[in-house]
Image (spheres, rainbow, N blue to C red):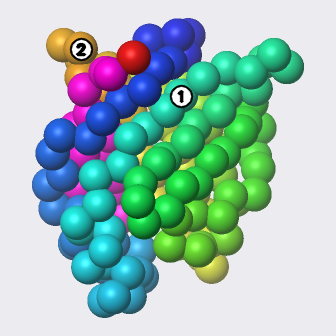
Amino acid sequence: MVDKFVGTWKMTTSDNFDEYMKAIGVGFATRQVGNRTKPNLVVCVDEQGLICMKSQSTFKTTEIKFKLNEPFEETTADDRKTTTVMTIENGKLVQKQTWDGKESTIEREVSDGKLIAKCKMGDVVAVRTYVKEA
């Protein structure tokens, strides 16, 4: 079910990410760094069956480990403390983050050998595209 997401993915494009970061409340300086950063996304399944997702860049590396459908506490790259739930919906890996009465969703799907991440906050949508390296 998550097998198609497993691997190392290199970001190739990022569209409207500055607007998404504004919508979730990221400050100007952090947005400037975030806009220039092209992180790798590493997805794996560990020996206990936990799904691991690591975002690696020269700016910051973040990692989450989770079981599908089970809420967990996440500290995001911009230091938000969220309650996050990961699910599989229609073949997409969906990450719902809630904090301070707000909700953001990141939908990841694999299509034509690319991983497409749609980051949504209200009516703002950013699209980040990755290609598989390994």
| Mark 2 or mark 1, earlier in chain | 1
Q: Residue at x 65, y 33 (%)?
A: 52
Image location (x, y in percent) of residue 109: 35, 26
Q: Nearer the viewer, residue 122 or 4?
A: 4
Residue at the location (67% across, 27% down)? 51
> In the rendered view, does 113 fall on the left or right side of 1?
left
Q: Tag 2: residue type?
A: Gly
- Label 1 sits on what residue type? Val
Mark 1 Cα-neighbour bin, 10 Å: few <14, some 14–19, many ≥20: many
Q: Which residue is mark 2?
A: 113
Q: Which residues are magenta?
A: 117-133
Residue 70 position, x and y percent, is: 77, 38
Judge whether residue 69 can be spotted in this image.
Answer: no
* Residue at 75%, 46% in the rendered image: 71
Q: Quadrant of residue 15?
A: bottom left
| Image quarter in which the C terminus is found | top left
As for residue 25 lying within the magenta part, the answer is no
Q: Is residue 128 above or below residue 115?
A: below
